[in-house]
Amino acid sequence: MGIQITPSVLNADLANLASEVNRIRSADWVHVDVMDNHFVPNLTLGLPVVESLARSTPLPMDAHLMIDDPDRWAPAYAEAGCGSVTFHVEAAAAPVRLAREIRAQGARASMALKPATPIEPYEDLLDELDMVLVMTVEPGFGGQGFLDLCLPKIRKARAMMERRGVQTWLQVDGGVSLETIERCAEAGADVFVAGSAVYSAEDPDAMVAALRARAESAQRALGQEGSDAVAG
Ligand code: DX5
Ligand code: ZN
């Protein structure tokens, strides 16, 4: 799978959600941040809005659930038509059962980690997951500064996936911009959420293209490094 760019609508004009989503035709996914004011100190939107948005766009929806008790709520987002459903492992009581339920509803199952949550304990869960989301800010708000301290975790996650031979996607979310996307791609990320970088750009499609180009060149350099290491 190549590089995928996923604008986050948190930073869009929320009163005009459908048109905001549909004006970025080059997006691979629409990233929808669901916040419940418990798991994170912010409140956004929930299932009825996501259901209606899914009917209003041809783009696949990537639901990022920053909510307590995802075991109870997450499968409904898959049923509502989201192509990918991400729950936070810090909030999930039974992440394996939950990932299986999301997959059973026909969606990709994804697990997110906050900056202070290590990836190592979850290596054995990788087979159950279609994507891992490494947060690169504390979840809750758009427009925060990128946390470089998360880069080693992205590298570890990529190394684990390679070791196990799984095709799990590796997403990063928070502070992703033209400044920071290369660092993430070099570390092994391949799916990039970008909120303020895309929605504050004068031409969001041009920004998606620029982000994609930077990530692709960093990914190529990474591949080159890998083959040099094998050759040398
Ligand atoms: C933050 C959300 C992000 C946010 C990203 O908790 O999960 O998806 O919208 O916004 P930027 O790209 O501005 O950091
Ligand atoms: Zn998000």
Image (cartoon, rainbow, N blue to C red):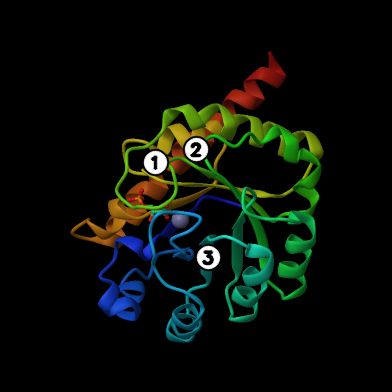
Vertical position of residue 232 compared to residue 151: above or below: above
Sequence order check, earlier mark of 3 and 1: 3
Residue 223 in sight? no
Q: Nearer the viewer, residue 101 or 90?
A: 90
Spatial distance from mark 1 to mark 2, Cα to Cα? Answer: 9 Å
- For the C terminus, the quadrant is top right
Q: Residues within 10 Å of mark 3 (few under 14, many from 20)?
A: many
Which residue sits furthest front?
Answer: 38
Secondary structure at badge 3 equals: strand
Spatial distance from mark 2 to mark 3, Cα to Cα? Answer: 20 Å
The label number, if any, that marks residue 214 in the structure image: 1
Q: Mark 3 and mark 1 in contact? Answer it, CB < 8 Å.
A: no
Q: Residues within 10 Å of mark 2 (few under 14, many from 20)?
A: many
The label number, if any, that marks residue 112 in the structure image: none
Q: Nearer the viewer, residue 75 or 166?
A: 75
Amino acid type indicated by mark 2: Ala
**Mark 3 — residue?**
62
Residue 182, x across and y down, in percent:
42, 35
Vertical position of residue 215 compared to residue 55: above or below: above
Q: Would you identify the image quadrant in which residue 226 lies?
A: top right
Residue 200 in sight? yes
Q: Would you identify the image quadrant in which residue 134 lies?
A: top right
Q: Nearer the viewer, mark 1 or mark 2?
A: 2
Residue 76, x across and y down, in percent:
63, 77
Sequence order check, earlier mark of 1 and 2: 2
**Mark 2 — residue?**
185
Which residue sits furthest top?
Answer: 232
Sequence order check, earlier mark of 2 and 3: 3
Q: Mark 1 and mark 2 in contact? Answer it, CB < 8 Å.
A: yes
Residue sitting at x 60%, y 65%:
85
